[in-house]
Structures are given as C-alpha cells and as structure tokens.
Image (cartoon, rainbow, N blue to C red):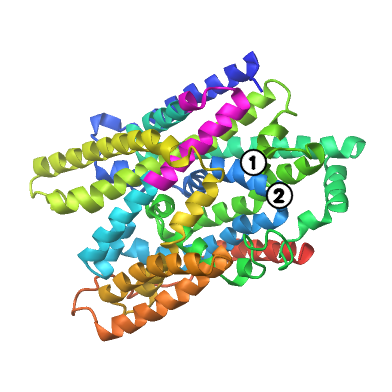
Amino acid sequence: MQLATIDIVVVGIYGIAILFLAQWVSREKDGKVKDSSDYFLASKNLPWWAIGASLIAANISAEQIVGMSGSGYAVGLAIASYEWMAALTLLIVGKFFLPIFLKNEIYTMPQFLEQRYGTSIRTIMAVFWLILYVFVNLTSIVWLGSIAVNKVAGVDQDIALFALGGFALVYQLYGGLKAVALTDIVQVTLLVLGGLLIAGITLSELGGDAGVVGGFTRLTTELPDKFDMILTKDNPFYKDLPGLSVLIGGMWIANLSYWGFNQYIIQRALAAKSLAEAQKGVVFAAFLKLLMPVIVVLPGIAAVILAPDLAKPDEAYPTMMRLLPPGILGLVFAALMAAVIASTASKINSIATIFTLDLYAKYKGVESRAEDAEGRDANERQLVLVGRMAAAIATVIALVVARPLLGNSDQAFQFIQEFSGFFTPGITVIFLLGLFWKPASEAGAIAAAIASVALSYLFKMYLPGLPFMDRMGWVFLIALGLAVVMSLAMPSATGRDRISTQGISYRTTRGFNIASAAVIAILIALYATWW
C-alpha cells in the first residue's frame, strides 16, 4: 500500500506544523533561560485540557491502535476493558493519589519513594524504571510505529524507525514537557477525529444504505460473540481476559500501577497549576478513554467481515485504512503518526527527568542549590543540559537495540506486558502502603519489590496455564502480606517518613463529582448491555 501524493503532502504539513508549534509554545519570554521546573514539569503551570490530552497522547500509541484493533479482530469488544477500566482508575487517581503527591510537591515517583521510605528504594526503582523505559517501552513504541509506517506507507522499516525516533527527540529536546503537553491537544484531536473517521467509514461500508447505524447493527447481529465483554472459560482467549478478573481482579493491579505510579503518565498531573486543575484533567482523560474503543476496537471487529482472511490480526487496522480515499488517508495516517510521536516524546522526557533529577542531581549534589542567584542559575542550566543529553542517548540506545530485541517477536505488545508485569504487583504494593499505611517501612518496600519479580517468575515457570491477570493478582496479595510482615518486624527509623498527609482533604469539587458519576453510569450501562 502506497500513499498518494496528496497524502504525502498532508503528512508533511502535519510534521512541519507540529514541530513549529512545539517550539513556539515552549519558548521562554524576555530572554529567560529554562530551569529544571520549566523543562521537566512545564513550569508547574499546565491547564486541565493539556493534562487530559497529554495523558491520552502519552498512553495511546502504535501498540494500542494497531495491537488493540488486532485484538478486536481476534477477541472482540472484551479487549475494550483495558480502556474502560482505565477510565475508572483515573477517577481514583484524581481523588485519592493526586492530593498527596501535589501537597508534598512530588516531581518524580522515585523522589516520593525516598521521602516516604529512604534512599535505597529510590535508587533501586529509578534504575528499574530507566531500564524498563529505554529497553522495553521506548523500544517497543518506535518499533511498532515503524511497522505501521512500513505497512501503510511502504517506507523501509529501518528508515521509518530512525525517522520516528529522531523526530520525537527533536520535537521535545528544546521545550521539554511543555512542548509535549501543550501540543498534545492537537495530537489527540487529530487522533480522535482520524479514528472516528475510519470507524465511521468501515461501519458505513458494512451498513450500505443504512449507514453507520446499519453497519453497527450488522456487526452485533452477525458477530454476537465479538460483543461478549466478560469471557467464559471455554473461550479460546480466556487466558488473556480471564472473566471477572478484568473487573475485580488483576487488571486493577496493572491499572493502578500504570495510571497512578508511572512517571511516564503521572508527570503530566504533577505539572498542574493546581490540584483542582489536575483533577479536571484526569476527568477529561477518563471521558476520552471511554471513547477510545470506538476508535481502535470497532474497526478491528468490522474487519472480521470486510477482510476475513487476514494473515495476522494486527493487519486489521492498516487494512481498514485502505478504504480511505486519498487525502483522507494522509490525514488518518498523520493521526497514527501523531500517536506514535507523542507517546515517544513523552517517554523520552520521562527518561530524562528520572535520570537527571533522581540519579544525576542526587548523587552529584547539583540539587543542593547555591545561595546566590548566579549559582542557582548555573545549577539549573546544568540540569537542563544533562536532561537533554540523557534524552538523546536514551533515544539512540532504543533505536539501536529495537531490531535485536523485537525483530523476531510476533507480539511486541505481549513483550511489554510480560516484562513489566513482573514488577507491577510490587510497585502497586509499595505505593499503596506508602500512601495510606504509615507503618510501612523501607524493608517492607524492598521485600515487596524482590518478591514481585521472584514470585512472578515462579508462577510463570510452574503454573504456565494461569492467566496473566490472575498471576498478577496472586503475586500482589502475597507481596502485600510480606511487605506488612517485614514492615512490622523492621520498622523505619523515627523521622524517616517525610510525606505529610496532615490537612489533606479528599473532598472534590461538585464538577468532579458530577463528571465522575457520569463516567461510572456510562460504564455500568456499557457492561450491562454487553455482559
């Protein structure tokens, strides 16, 4: 499949425009030099719409669009639980987690761990997150993005790989988080409109004269099994989505870890101008998550009828793109690239943030500010420079190792889930106890981290038939019990816990409560309809 000239022009205009916009919105006025707050936390002045849009732009990339559409083709609407349960998780993060993080002026997740537990767990988790982000997440994003470019545009995959990584690096290198977050509203708008367009065209193709509604009716009538939200044990995909575990089991462990304690995601909310603004942002993101299955899952289900003989399910979305006329194809392709680039740029900035603020600044003493203004400015310039260098080096490493790590893998999305799932239960235990149980100690946190990896490996080796989500649930419970026992046996020294929860209110605004009730009502209606 080749792009027409008009499609190439559309994509080119998008690339130039978004690069220019990123530099313009992140410029500093009156000759001001960027400091670490500007570069890593967007001057702690992000509005709600930028927070919500950036949360989705950071989350949705090629593995979600192509991979989830492929899962729609193979499994059906049940895969939408990843999106819909995330909407509910975002409400919990906004109401219960953000008040603590923002009151304590947290800028990275490892920093929270040090203030709550001690320096050892901060260093351990900072190194872990850097390895995970560079060798798993960043590598997978650019690799899957290059596959999409190759399939849709016919560009050599290696050229696409380095072009995507290079563009994302340049896109955020000067402006940092501000460049990423303030342009993500454009990226998400393009992603949503492009996704709705391809969903509408595929359904219209199915519905004929009856249009979109007729197409959807035809899908639910001819493929009723594709609209089962809760899979039974006799379903061939039960191991991937094990029944009620998607509602009350292991999916909660993954969602809380990803949306609440993941630097790559939570950094946007930490950069909010206020708690109320951050909470409005996560509610906005929750509504967008409700919409995402229409964009990424429905085209995959439609492909079951429109393209029943695909070699691989992951070919569903690129195949449905072939229905688009020239010009429109370029717009939707630009939307796909917007998702890849926004997600890649966000990951690069988070890598730079953790390396600079949690490792370099901490152990080089740069974070201890000089008393005079000139010394403070020098420290800040040094931090921003190190952050940019870390971003560039991490990107180069990811591009170089992408093919050796993933070139022979048929399921890069599973590669991400399998690796990160070893650590997710422990991370969730450490943060939940750190936020809400004062006796939790560093010994308990380290025990939970070690147990999470060891137990996940043992479960995988000796209980290979256990569904992935159920494995995370069991490991979480065991690691939680071990952390409690170790915390009681080896309590922290007096004064070690520097996270303050005094005076924190979990009361939210009337607008947040109404919006949350609307999200919950929509979720109940969706599951009640397709149970």
Residue 463: image location, x then y, percent = 53, 69
Which residue of the protein is positioned furthest toward the top in this rendering?
A: 5
Please name the residue that numbered disc 1 is placed on.
314
Residue 481, position as x, y percentages in the image: 40, 81
Q: Is residue 255 above or below residue 130?
A: below
The part of the image, by quadrant, that contains residue 86 is bottom right
Residue shown at 30%/47% (left/top)? 353
Instruction: Specify the quadrant that holds the N terminus.
Output: top right
- Quadrant of the image for the C terminus? bottom right
Report the side of 435 relative to 508 (left or right).
left
Q: Residue furthest right?
A: 209
> Would you call the spot at circle 2 few (<14 residues within 10 Å), some (14-19), or many (20 or more)?
many
**Which element carries disc 2, helix, strand or loop?**
helix
Secondary structure under tag 1 reads: helix
Image coordinates of residue 374 in percent, x first then y, are 10, 40
- Seen at 66% across and 33% down, the residue is 318
Q: Which badge, 1 or 2, is on the more N-terminal residue? A: 2
Q: Which residues are magenta?
A: 135-160
The label number, if any, that marks residue 219 in the structure image: none
The residue that disc 2 covers is 74
Q: Residue at x 34, y 33 (%)?
A: 396
Amino acid at pointer 2: Ala
User: Does 97 appear in magenta?
Assistant: no
